[in-house]
Image (tube, rainbow, N blue to C red):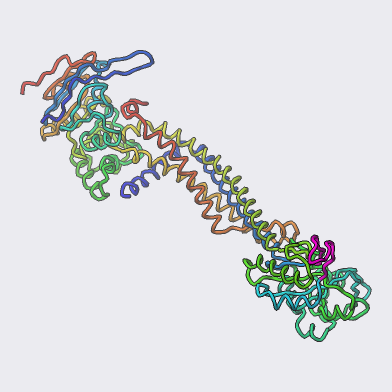
Amino acid sequence: MMMIEMRAIRKTYRTGRVEVEALRDVNLDVDRNEFVAIVGPSGSGKSTLMNLLGCLDTPTAGAYRLSGESVAGLDRNRLAEIRNRHIGFVFQNFNLLPYASALENVELPLLFAGLPANERNERATAILEKVDLADRMHHKPGELSGGQMQRVAIARALVNRPTMVLADEPTGNLDSVSGRGIVGLFQELHAAGQTIVMITHDMAIARIASRVVQIRDGEIVEDKSAAA
Amino acid sequence: MRFAAAEIALVLRLFQADLAHQRKRIALTVIAIAWGTLSIVLLLSFGEGLKRSLSKGARGMGEGVAVVWPGATTRAFMGLPSGRRIAIREEDAELLRRCIPEIETLSLEYARHIPVTAGTKSVNTRVRGVEPEFGEMRNLHPQAGGRFLNAPDMAQKRRVVFLGEELARDLYGTEDAVGRAVQINQSSFLVVGVARKKLMMGMYSGHDRTQATIPATSFKAMHSDAEVGNLVYRPARPELSGRAKAELYRVMGRKHHFDPEDTRALGLWDTLEMQRINRDVAVGVQIFLGIIGGLTLFVGGMGVANIMYAVVKERTREIGVKMALGAKARQVMLPFVLEALLMTVIGGILGAAIALLLIFGLAALPLENEAFDLLGRPTFSPVIAVTTALVLGTIGAAAGYFPARRAAFVDPAESLRYE
């Protein structure tokens, strides 16, 4: 069973009287433990694809099965559950809650999953240690560097042991040194068996992925596995 | 529940953040809620004070008593014409006591306006001759050092008098009247008691404070031609008042030959009715005041809702993030509802504290004033506390709920792009 099965996915936005086809006839399968980089220029439909993959949005047409489960026609609360269980988001601008500590930020997905406080604390602490932030756990995002903030965000994405990590330009807001650190972290995660889908426009970063999918004008124009 | 506890900690932090961010707006809103709470508590307390004073005033003439006076028939009956005068006879009292078990106590009342004189001071006032039961029934309580008329006074036709407090003041100024002699109708009467001051809203033949009360037998001894002016009675229980009234007409009708349905043959005033109406009016006034207070509080609630809408807009991105992390609608909404409730509760506590301070401050002021006697003083009660808390809670929850609903319907994909 494929982790992700997208069949004939179309997404149309309506702005006023104009219809914009963001995605037309996208087919995409992602297997367990793949590290897929989705690349393409801005306006190509990357973000739309990311929203659909992350169950933040639903396709206009087509079928999407995540872990064998069809996502079409689910209500908002069911979709929230699926996101909570299956997907770990990493955003370009980190999207941490500014008033909460690193630990509390990482605990959030567990909070929404309804885990008890001690278990939340245990798991969040362990995962923060894994991303080398044991000494920054009680700092607020404002007291952390960009690279550290993105590590917190990655810890938050991993804490619920998701089916896949979905990263949207995770190095876009970082300097090259911090960026390299984050890329290294993703490589480690992949080596440990984590399925990763990353959206980027940076070919250099895409090169570390096991597979590169190129998208242009709402269509997949190239799908190439790296020579392993 | 588990979720709520952690959320509350976060909400407190959020509120702190908001507080720093929009201090002035939050302060104004909290003040608006405090003002609304102050209004509702004070108005309800004024209503409560009015209610109690009205009820006290209505009971001033006596609790649940009825007054009967002579009348005239309006129907022909057993060959007798209509328009016939029906007088009350002295022996009727005994008859009614014997025949109507629903009547608990009863007293005759003779009365005449005559001068009452003490030394050089003379007051022309209503002097009434009554039986000892009259005092307790009609709420005539003596000040310390005095007493009301008793059975021996009655039996021995003693020349003793119980003075209304205003009459005593007119005759003796601030001096103690008990033990002194007054002249009534050229006879010397010993003052045995002076009435305590009381609030009295319903009355017949004037306020008790200006009247002199003597034993019915002594009255009759002075005025052998006197006719019974009134009968005052009290039913054993309030719910028996209807039966007692019907029985009275039946018994009196048979003796005096009038149709028991002819209610004009004898005048009758049942004060229970007045007390009921008074209570209804007071409750109505209190509800009215409560609604005014509630509306004031409602305006404050609009302020809270307004802020919460702004906060939802400001946190659109954060809402999107939480949704991406798997927050369900309920989990997205709860912080907003809690934050609105928090603001409402803070304002509510502030307003209630000020209101209580005012109420107890007003109670401590030594105000001797007729207006205050009638209006009563604002009185706080548990019912007011519960009502206010319920209204506050409802308004706070609503002020949070509607903005929170908007938050729950944020499009996560859209909001993550929102700057």
Is residue A147 toward the left or the right of residue B366 in the image? left
Q: Position of residue B249 (x, y in %)?
A: 73, 67
Residue A155 vs B200, above or below: the answer is above
Name the residue: 21% across, 14% down.
Answer: A216
Q: Position of residue B59 (x, y in %)?
A: 69, 65
Q: Quick one: which residue is furthest to the front in this view?
A: B79
Q: Position of residue B403 (x, y in %)?
A: 43, 36
Q: Is residue B168 visible?
A: no
Quadrant in the picture for the C terminus of chain A: top left
**Part of the protein shown in magenta:** B69-87
Specify the principal SS of the magenta part: loop
Quadrant housing residue B215: bottom right
Q: Is residue B308 visible?
A: yes
Residue B78 vs A188, above or below: the answer is below
Q: How many marks?
A: 0
Quadrant in the picture for the N terminus of chain A: top left
Q: Position of residue B346 (x, y in %)?
A: 49, 48
Residue A177 vs B402, above or below: the answer is above
Is residue B121 toward the left or the right of residue A210 in the image? right
Name the residue: 71% across, 77% down.
Answer: B97
B126 or B8: nearer the viewer: B126
Quadrant housing residue B371: bottom right
Name the residue: 79% across, 82% down.
Answer: B154
Residue B81 belongs to magenta span? yes
Residue A206 vs B283, above or below: the answer is above
Residue A141 belongs to magenta span? no
Is residue B15 toward the left or the right of residue B387 in the image? left
